[in-house]
Amino acid sequence: MGSDLKRKYLLVTPAKNEEQNLPDVSKSVIGQRLRPELWIIIDDGSTDGTPCILKDLQANCSWVQSIRLPPRPRDITFHYSYVCKQGFDYALEYCRGNNLEFEYIALLDADTVLEENYFGKLLDEFEKDNSIGIVSGGIYYETKGKLSLEVTTKNLPRGTGRIWRKECFFETGGYQVEPSPDSISNIKALMRGWRLVQYADVVQMQKRKTSAADGLWHGYIKNGWMAYYLGKNSLIALVNVLYFSVKYPYYTGAAYFWGYFSSAIKRDKQIQDPEIRAYYKNQGLTGLLSRVSGVFSRNSRDVLEGEP
């Protein structure tokens, strides 16, 4: 039983108006060599055909459940994390009520298609090293039939397709209703001695660019605002502006600049969590030099989902 338990996981997916992507995403989850014990899909008030797709999924797969929230505008700040937390809370309560055992907890966005053995490969890595707390695969995009990797800060798990070891999930306070909840989870795990790993050779294909649900301009404004909200150093923010400004599409640097520095000028509210505030305060010069030295490196890309 112990061996079997090590291979059991829960999966949570937020979905809003995903009728175009959800069929491919659900096919990739159902086709996994190692399927989840429970898959909770949160319908965030969809107004398209998403509810019908979810109804069919539940009719054909006993391990798929969905909950529906009232319609609200799409939002990648507080509301996104609220939607995800509704899914995690429901999944955990369902497991308690139905005596379902699990060892891992996973999050998958409704625009992300997985390779056939995605979860199996990543759970293999967990079993090799008990110090690993959070993992993900690499995010790829398909262009003209070819896959290209979205390069991010080395070894940090992505927001979608991430898996927590159960102990790490609970020890770090679960999934918090905050902007950039993946960054917060990463930081809290690091501060408790857990290892974080991104296995870039384990493929998850994202159907749209990170932060592009409402268009890249608005997405990068929100990324800049989130960086300010979390308390990131203004000099590090400028380095990120520089990086985005020399990468196509070049306007993302201006959007990020506006999001961060307009918030700073207005002295908008910032996160109150003492651990997160201390983390960014202590980064100081070391953190800045690290960003500067890697700003034009293919292995350095800050700000995107899941990046502390």
Image (spheres, grey):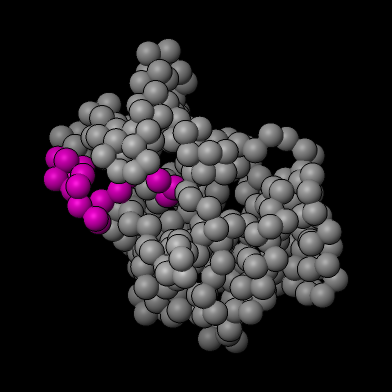
- Image quarter where the C terminus lies is top left
Residue 123: tell me if it is visible.
no
**Residue visible at 79% across and 68% down?**
57
Q: Quadrant of residue 299?
A: bottom left
Q: Nearer the viewer, residue 106 or 256?
A: 256
Quarter where residue 94 is shown: bottom right
Q: In the picture, residue 97 is in which quadrant?
A: bottom right
Residue 25 locus on image (x, y percent): 63, 66
In the current view of this chain or complex, which residue is farthest to the front?
Answer: 144
Residue 296 among those drawn in magenta: yes
Give the x, y percent position of residue 141: 45, 61
The range drawn in magenta is 289-306
Q: Quadrant of the N terminus?
A: bottom right
Give the vertical position of 23 relative to 302 (above or below).
below
Q: Residue at x 34, y 37 (%)?
A: 250
- The spot of residue 222 in percent (x, y) is 48, 32
